[in-house]
Amino acid sequence: MIKQRTPLILVAAALLFSAVTAYGQTVPPASQQDELIAVLNAPDASRQQKAAACRQLSFIATKRAIPTLASLLADPDLNHMARYALETIPDPAVNDALLKALDTLQGKPLIGVMGSLGVRGETRAVAPLSERLTHQDPLVAQAAARALGQIGNAEAAQALSRAVSGAAGDTRLAVAEGLFRCAETTGGPTALGIYDRLLQLKTPHQVRAGALRGAILAREDGLDLLTTSLQSEDYILFSSAVQTAIEMSDARVTQVLSAALSGLPADSKILILGALAERGDPAALPTLVTAASRGNQAVRIAAIKAMPPIANAAALGTLVTLIKDPDAQIVQAAQTSLVALPGSAADQAVLGMLERGDPESQLQALELIGQRRMTDVAPALLKAARGNDAAVRVASIRMLGDLEDAVQFPVLIELLLGARSVQEVRAAEQTLSAVCTRDARPLPGQVTIRKAVYGAVGAGGSADVTQKVADMVSSGAAAIEASNASFGDPAAGVVKQLKIEFTANGVTQSQTVPEGRRITLLTSVTPPAYVNDLSAAMAQATSQQKRAILRVLRAAQGSAALDAVRTAMKDSDADVSSDATSIFCAWPSAEVLPEVLALARTATELKVKVVALRGAIRLIPLENITDAEKLAGFKAILPLIQRDDETRLLLGSLAEIPMPEALAITASYLDNAAVRNEACFAVIAIAEKMAPNNQAQIREALQRVLKTTTNAEVKKRAAQVLEKV
Amino acid sequence: MAKTTRRRFLASSAALAFPAIVPSQVLGANGAVAPSNQITIGQIGFGWIGGSHLSTLLGRKDVRYVGACDVNGEKLRDVCARIEKQYAENAGQASYKACTAYGDFRDMLARQDMDAVVIATPDHWHALLSIHAARAGKDIYCEKPLTLTLNEVRAVVKTVRRYDRVFQTGSQQRSNVFGKFRDACERVRNGRIGKVLSIDVSTGNPPVPCDLPAEPKPDHFDWDMWVGRTAWRPFHSQLADKQWRPYEEYCGGGFADMGAHHFDIAQWALGMDDSGPVEIMPPDGKERERVSFKYANGVIMNHVGGNCLGLTFHGTDGELYVGRDGFWSKPESIAATSLSPSELRLYRSDDHHGNWLDCIRTRSRCVADVEIGARTATICHLGNIAYQLKQTLQWDPVRERFTNNDQANRLMSRPLRSPWSL
């Protein structure tokens, strides 16, 4: 006995152990069947062990396991697991065991065995199951009905048909369910008889809806019943008929649905229109056009929305007409459908609206051109941009900037020079700027990598890859891919990103991309011809137009554009020269720094001095020079600063220079209440970077911060840094 | 037979007159949906994603909770209190009593004044509850994955069709929730990446057997109902408190969890919503670390590890990634360029719950109809069975049977604990 128990306990333990191993370990080898049966027969095996054995047997058990498993069918704790193993055994002897158990079981074990007989489709069970359709326990009767339905032969159907009239409540529902299942299995006349019978009975709405669907689909020609049902005043039957129509491939269904439409209430019409749209039959279009043109608003909208999938010229004309409807919601629906309407005919219709329509139609056409992403429309847009209506001119000029089509740049400049209003000038400026940006081409040149980090998007590991990226650039790479292949994997299993701060051709940029994308380390330049055209246009432009051109030149960038801005700084028109100076001082590359510094020193007008100082404070950090040289630059402009705003900016820039002198300068502002906050932040930032050098100076500066600030967050940060010193 | 009005059909409260059925966008046009336009709902399950459904649907004027069901009595009490507090505030009343708490879903489904149900339980209950709800004549929103086993897939679809129910699967990526999933599928369907060669789907690992010990059961918890159709086991707080996801008794593990979202998008992009792969290849310990699927047209779909956030399509003309963390392509123009009107558009829904409610009103099929959810669940089960058997399996997506492996066919079903049956 002891000898026998030991391996069984081991097997049982192994069953439980297997439950904690990795996936794919739960299917045992077929050779384990006898050991698993032995576990079931062992008097001292626990319920948990026996349940695990049944689970394993469900994968591999053969006829040999049936007697043992069948003996557990009455076990209050294990009857489910016994069926768990039995139900999947292909051998027909399982059915013998289940049939035998029917006569001995009660309650849940009986219900379970009846279900298993249904799953296995055992026709010998029809008679005993039929007897239980009137069982006093309604759960047993309902299980019998469902099992009979799963067996689904003619005898089962007959038994269920006999029982359905006498059944009540949930049992009637279960018998109906059994009948549905029989109908689905048998098909043909039997199915038709079942559906017709269910339709005649007093049953819940879902049964009647399903029965009607079945009755229509089971008929060789279900059109008559469909037609009749579409006239039903019973909403259940009506909506079920409409739903069923969607499933029918018969081409005549479209005609039946269309014919049913007249005389129906609005809600029913909407259902039918939806069905016509889902069927996608172009033959429905005349119906949709009629319904869209007049009548109830909701019905019209439903018809309009149904058009795009099956549209043709007729629909197009209707939608173009409806876009002028007095009802705003109809207009909105028509516009939406026009956008979605496929094909070049729709494009032509939209162009026709632009060329021949009234101003309102023209504006709608412009909207549609954008939404439809139409191409080859530049000539029509240019014509509209030179038309009589001011709003159409502005919208057309704007649309030219959104186009992917090539438009001659001088033509766009002509539009600017011919602008008749501020709005047109502004629109032309936006379009010219957009085209300059769009047509800019990469410019090879000097690239300096300032900082590169590859790592997790949120919390997680990251790696400083500055040197790696710099090496890649040195070896000729113009674009860097954010990938583990490039940098290894600093944060396994999480999504990462690459951030690179770099200077290209004097312009500092910072770009961040997710894994799989690339950062292109280049600046881009607008075609020189564009800049030449813009420069030439300055001579003929009004003051307002010149100022617009200057803003376009700022978007164009590049040395030629900068030269044009320089020239404009001397313009006789004060507004033009002022704008040019501001744009010059805000130029993105550091090449303008000497001139900006000179302006800051020599300008007599405060406004010019301020923009120059601000430009200098921004540009000095962009230069490819040492921190000491940057500090020298800042010290040089320090005496020129007259306002607190520029002092604050300067403190922000000094915060990036971890040098004792920078710390001393920033600390000197701690007593200035107007800029104290920025001074505190700058002192802390420098101290963080400088530590652990110059500890005495850092400590003193931080203690002054602690003493002077009232900002709790600043105090906390200062204390944290002080602790490290 | 008495005529059935739309109100009796949809909401079945004879006391309310029902106005004309109109699309919800029209209903909401003036920002005040009439009470009789509301769809009355109940919800089963309020842990995990159930709370999110509650928040979303509580905020809608065209929906009214009339019932709530959970096996956790304490949670159920809190949920009902929250629903009633919200409705009381909306009505400007001190209290609102119209949401009934149910411990047994069958009692709730028996209500005649409830139009629809949200099913947000652990996965092992999804199929059975969907079937019960359909039989009871309710329209259904059911969380993904739709079933626990392959055999349940067809049972759910047949039952929903049998009773003409509107069904929305909770795979909300079909409504562009969390990312530009529809945009990606439209690009693939329109050939923007050329011929599709393969798809890499990032999802979790298959489940493992549950090894949790027994714990004392709290009085407020109906554990027998929680276990439901699965094999009996004693209470454990981890299972009761949403941590059932790793265990094969109750779900398809992490593989089916996010797989139900991302395989779903792959199916949509391939136009396979009524079909599926024909071969499933297990890991080979060499080049193939995880399961791969092959479609009849030769497309290979690989299960890959990673962040489980999305999937990558590889084609002859480019690659396209779509996920909850982004939408990009090589070349970039594939993702960056919009579709023209002449290109194919897919079913557009930008509000998953709204789409369900619209379809209830118009008796249309939802963007994630039951067949769609069922076919995606099928892929999850196929993959898990291949992981389990470690054999290459041939699958017939029409007959829905394995054609080369009897043992795999045995794994298609799991007998239900009485009194539950499909």
Image (cartoon, coloured by chain):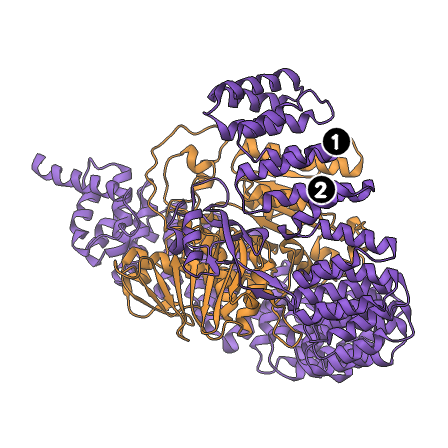
Chain colours: A purple, B orange
Chain at numbered mark 2? A
Please determine whether, in this image, residue A569 is positioned above or below residue A318: above
According to the picture, the residue beneath numbered tag 1 turns out to be: A644
Residue A149: % across, % down: 46, 63
Please determine whether, in this image, residue B268 is positioned above or below residue B213: below
Amino acid carrying label 1: it is: Asp
Residue A687: % across, % down: 53, 26
Query: For this rendering, which residue is in front, B244 or B14?
Result: B244
Residue A626: % across, % down: 52, 41
Query: For this rendering, which residue is in front, A623 or B6?
Result: A623
In the displayed structure image, the side of residue A540 where residue B365 appears, left or right:
left
Query: For this rendering, which residue is in front, A126 or B123?
Result: B123
Query: For this rendering, which residue is in front, A601 or A500?
Result: A601
In the displayed structure image, the side of residue A6 where residue A589 appears, left or right:
right
In the displayed structure image, the side of residue B314 where residue B58 appears, left or right:
right
Residue shown at 84% from the left, 56% from the top:
A576
Mark pair 1, 2: CA separation: 12 Å
Q: Could you confirm whether marks 1 and 2 are on the same chain?
A: yes
According to the picture, the residue beneath numbered tag 2 turns out to be: A614
Residue A544: % across, % down: 87, 60
* Res B368 seen here: no
- Residue B380: numbered disc: none
Amino acid carrying label 2: it is: Arg
Tell me the element at label 2: helix
